[in-house]
Image (cartoon, grey):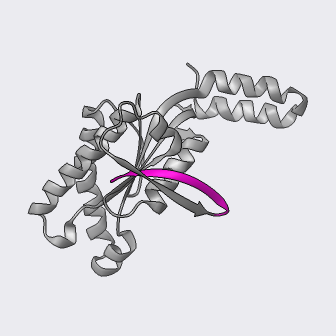
Amino acid sequence: MNNTQEQLNKLLQLRNEYPEKQEEIDQQIYEKFCQTHAILVIDMSGFSRTTFRYGIIHFLAMIHQMKTVVIPAIESTGGKLIKQDADNIFAVFPTVNQAVECSFKLQQLTGTVNTILPEEKDIHLCIGIGYGKILMIDNHDMYGSEFNLAAKLGEDLAQRNEILLTQEAYQNLNPKQGEWQEVEFSVSGLEFIAYKPK
């Protein structure tokens, strides 16, 4: 499948040049790039506080430690790493259940690691999970509303050691793993519901 950034750029250029062909070009984009996944977004808690107190090299070492825990867990639960950006990890899974299983596993693993690390090196994750159609670019980037929501949950709204699911992800969690409670958010004029484990 030819789903490179270069190919997307060409199609977007054509879309801009020929607005009368917008519908046809959009269909080509969906056919080449559209995939359905559970989306996992992980952010480390405490970047500003830790960096201010201990310095950037200390935090970079923590990011490296976090990746040695997170990436094997993603792969062992059927996920695929898409990209890394500073202390953020982005991955996709075939099902929401696998993404949730990975998240619970990461909570256990980081909890275990933290028992042997000094407090200033403890790893705490904030996790957001979405589910739906996204545009996948060469397996290294993705775009879509469920990706945006998962990123908002993981990077901005989840508290330390918290897992948040979009409404679409929760509806596709089957069977339900544990008990979940509904949480309402209002961000940048957007109101939406998420779910977190009780």
The answer to whether residue 29 of the structure is visible from this angle is yes
Position in image of residue 87 (x %, y %): 37, 58
Position in image of residue 12 (x %, y %): 74, 35
The answer to whether residue 140 of the structure is visible from this angle is no
Task: Say above or below: 121 vs 71.
Answer: below
Identity of the residue furthest to the bottom in this view: 53
Residue at the spot x=13%, y=55% of the render? 112
Task: Say above or below: 65 vs 36.
Answer: below
For residue 29, side relative to residue 98 (left or right): right
Q: Name the residue nearer the viewer: 67 or 79.
A: 79
**Number of numbered discs present?**
0
Quadrant that contains the C terminus: bottom left
Residue at the spot x=37%, y=48% of the render? 180
Q: Judge whether residue 7 is colored magenta.
A: no
Task: Say above or below: 145 vs 66.
Answer: above
For residue 165, side relative to residue 193 (left or right): left
Residue at the spot x=60%, y=27% of the render? 33
Query: Quarter-wise, where is residue 26 in the image?
Result: top right
Quadrant that contains the N terminus: top right
Q: Main secondary structure of the magenta part?
A: strand
Task: Say above or below: 79 vs 180.
Answer: above
For residue 11, side relative to residue 4 (left or right): right
Q: Name the residue nearer the viewer: 197 or 35.
A: 197
User: What segment is highlighted magenta in the picture?
Assistant: 188-198
